[in-house]
Each structure stands twice: as C-alpha cells, then as structure tokens.
Amino acid sequence: MNFLHAILFAILQGASELFPVSSLGHAVVVPAVLHWGVDQASIGFLPFLVMLHLGTATGMLVYFYRDWLAMLRGVLGAGYRSENIVERQLVLRLIIATLPAVIVGEIVKKPVTHLFASPLIACIFLIVNAGLLLLGEQLRRQVVKRSTTLTNMDALIIGLFQCLAFLPGISRSGAAIVGGLRRGVAHEEAAKFSFLMGTPVIFAAAVVEIPKLLHAHELHALFGLSLLAAVVAGVVAFASTAFLMRYFRDHDSWALKPFAWYCGIFGAGSFVLLLMGL
C-alpha cells in the first residue's frame, strides 16, 4: 500500500463510517473497481482498517465530547441528582445496545471473515443495505423519542439492528438508525445514539487489533502510515458528523432515501463492472 492509497482509504473510511453507506463495503469494493492493487488479504490490511476506525472513533468522540463529559459526571454523581439519573440511564442504554455486537461478533467473526475479501459479495450487500434503508423509512413509527428517553428494549433492538453490519456492505450506522426509526426515534436522535453507541465498539475493536501492528514484525513499517491515515480519518469523521447531524435534523421525513439510492446504484454498477472484469 502506497501513501496515496492510504490517504484515500482514510478519507473513504472517515466519511463512509458515519454516512449510512457501509465503510467496510466501500473499503472492499472501491479498491477493486479502481484497480488499486492493494492486497486486502494481507496480514496488515485488517489492522490498518482498525487504525482508521480508531481515528474515526476519535473524531466522533471529539464532536460529542460534551455528551461524554455529561455522562461521566452522571456516573460519578458530580451533577444535579435529576441530571445524574438521566445520564446514568443513557450510559446503561448504550451498554445494552453494545452488548449484542460484542456477543454476535464473537460468534460470527470466523464464519464471515472470508466475506470481507470478496468485492462481489460486498456489492450484493450494498444493494441489500439500500433495501434496508428504504424499508426503515417505510416502517418507521411516528412516536418521537429522544436518545435520553429510550427504554431498555429500545436500546436492545437498536443494538440488534447494528449487528447486521457484520456483513460487509451493510452500514453499521444505517442499520442502527433504521432500528431507531422502528422504535419511534427521529433521524437526528437515532443518528446521535448510533454515533455514541459506535464509539466504544470501534475502540474495543482497536484494542484487539492494534497490538498486531505493534508486535508483528512484518507490520512495523506500516504502523507510521497507519497512524497518519488514522489522523486523516478522524478529521474527516468530525466534519462528516457535523454535516450529518444538521442534515438529519433538516430532512427528517426522508433522510435515508438518498443514501439508499446511492448504495443501490453504486453496488449494482460495481457488481457489473467487476463481473465483466472492467
């Protein structure tokens, strides 16, 4: 992987992780369509992607730092009693929503690993992701809830929807937002909960994978480039989060539809190009 490819991967990851279009699906499909010649089955590619995810999570953490500080004050009992209760409940909801991904991830990690290197399969699931986003808009409930008023069942359902992202091409944020819509949460609040929920999941993945970059001799040369790419991904993720929060607030009645059409067209078009060997 050369410098240009690493930076392009970082920009792609920083944007597509937040946008409901599947960062992993794009990381698999785009290099294949553009003939970058990157060996995605190499020992360093997955840890490199995890470093990009770490940068993305850091960008999200910085954007929502006030929310995380409020939750920390609530857990420590440093705020008013009523505020502490609300923040502790939000922390509990985030934990409940995260647990399905931890459990399902351990179960399906090995069976689905081979899918992550197949651009054609990723294209198919990008098309499926398009259908999921459109279905989410159709099945959304009109009861409007906020992220701070979710029930335990709401959080669990959203967390289960998030698990669909273990398939390359299904967006984690998109699936979680669809789960939120189904539970009566508006797009902006569903996106916010999805972004907050994704931060510890991504950091947890980094804790597992980054030591491979640090301790595997073959990967030492890649670590510096991965670190630079992670910074770029973080900056792009911060900007993407700022844009999306405003976008979801201003287009609540149809916000997921443009992303659905994009995924469908991009997935189908890429599938045809790859199948024809172009």
Image (cartoon, rainbow, N blue to C red):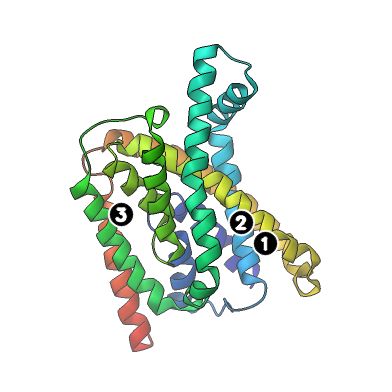
Tag 3: amino acid: Phe
Front residue of 86/21: it is: 86
Q: Does the residue at mark 2 contact the one at mark 3 (Cβ under 8 Å)?
A: no
Residue occupied by mark 3: 259
Q: CA distance from mark 1 to mark 2?
A: 6 Å
Tag 1: amino acid: Glu
Give the farthest residue toward the top: 80
* Comes first in the chain, label 3 or label 1: 1
Residue occupied by mark 2: 205
The quarter holding residue 274 reads bottom left
Q: Using a 10 Å C-alpha cutoff, classify the residue at mark 2 as few (fewer than 14 neighbours), some (14 to 19) or many (20 or more).
A: some
Give the farthest residue toward the bottom: 277
**Secondary structure state at the residue bearing disc 2:** helix
Front residue of 248/95: it is: 95
Tell us which disc is closer to us: 2 or 3.
2
Residue 6 image offset from top left, x and y in percent: 61, 65
Q: Residue at x 37, y 40 (%)?
A: 153
Q: Residue at x 54, y 55 (%)?
A: 102
**Secondary structure state at the residue bearing disc 1:** helix
Q: What number of labels is visible?
A: 3
**Secondary structure state at the residue bearing disc 3:** helix
The quarter holding residue 193 reads top left
Residue occupied by mark 1: 209
Tag 2: amino acid: Ala
In the figure, 73 relative to 106: above or below?
Answer: above
Residue 218 image offset from top left, x and y in percent: 77, 75
Residue 156 image offset from top left, x and y in percent: 41, 45
Left or right of residue 191: residue 5: right
* Quadrant into which the C terminus falls: bottom left
Residue 101 image offset from top left, x and y in percent: 50, 54
In the figure, 4 relative to 151: above or below?
Answer: below
